[in-house]
Amino acid sequence: EAQVTQNPRYLITVTGKKLTVTCSQNMNHEYMSWYRQDPGLGLRQIYYSMNVEVTDKGDVPEGYKVSRKEKRNFPLILESPSPNQTSLYFCASSSGGSGRLVTNEQFFGPGTRLTVL
Amino acid sequence: AQSVTQLDSQVPVFEEAPVELRCNYSSSVSVYLFWYVQYPNQGLQLLLKYLSGSTLVKGINGFEAEFNKSQTSFHLRKPSVHISDTAEYFCAVSDQGGNQFYFGTGTSLTVIP
């Protein structure tokens, strides 16, 4: 089954304790992205990746890191989490579209609910 | 950066009635436009998209949207809603220069039996 998986689905942690949220897709997609969803703010893009070793900042990259060492995986790293990073996080992937432009559907994972105390 | 405005945060509508969910975006340059739906406790899935060509776009589940460049709008419509359409709807924009996506704050559609 074609899917985007995220782990963990739920995480409660404390301020300053490094954590990684994993994202994996089995569709051989080149484009992957991370979003956070907050009430009243919708989804905001954190980072995206056009391909292996190619990553770019989205709208809200501060406090986050990503890496793309393999095509299928795109982990989100919080080196020193803070309470304002409490949110629902979604990973997404897409086959791209025309050239470098992503015009095809993004497939979203089930989400990771993170609470930072 | 783009901005996307969804004017209605909540829209209640009776079953089998028509509905319009409004979306306006900020840019006057060419953009790609998308509507996604999020059912409770799930990720988002694509309803429809506008890239170019005909301004009336048809999507899944009977939804359609009309691109209006002069008004920078991309409103979503359905002539007759069902209970199963109850969900959160997000309008999104990406600019043709890159692959950043900007989402609106969402509209919660509640279909009343």
Image (spheres, rainbow, N blue to C red):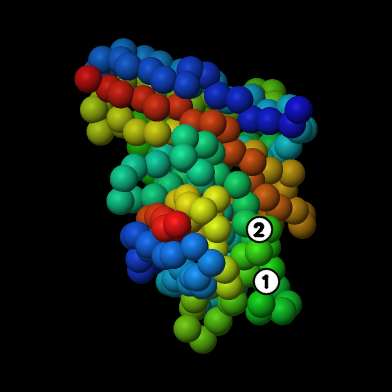
Kindly identify the amino acid type of the residue bearing the numbered disc 1.
Val
Quarter holding the C terminus of chain A?
A: top left
Residue A18: give x, y in percent of width and height.
Answer: 36, 15
Would you identify the image quadrant in which residue B113 lies?
bottom left
**Residue depicted at x 58% and y 60%:** B34
Residue A45: give x, y in percent of width and height.
Answer: 46, 45
Q: Horizontal placement of A4 versus A29: left or right?
A: left
| Chain hosting mark 1 | B
Would you identify the image quadrant in which residue B105 lies?
bottom left
Kindly identify the amino acid type of the residue bearing the numbered disc 2.
Asn
Would you identify the image quadrant in which residue A3 lies?
top right
Element at label 1: strand
Question: Observer-nearest residue: A30 or A41?
Answer: A41
Q: On screen, B60 above or below A82?
A: below
- Can residue B101 be seen at all in this image of the molecule? no
**Residue depicted at x 23% and y 27%:** A83
Question: Observer-nearest residue: A43 or A49?
Answer: A43
Residue B35: give x, y in percent of width and height.
Answer: 56, 59
Question: Which residue is denoted by mark 2 in the rendering?
Answer: B61
Q: Horizontal placement of A9 versus A81: left or right?
A: right
- Can residue B60 be seen at all in this image of the molecule? yes
Residue B15: give x, y in percent of width and height.
Answer: 49, 62
Question: Which residue is denoted by mark 1 in the rendering?
Answer: B57
**Residue depicted at x 51% and y 44%:** B39
**Residue depicted at x 34% and y 33%:** A87
Q: On screen, A45 above or below A68?
A: below
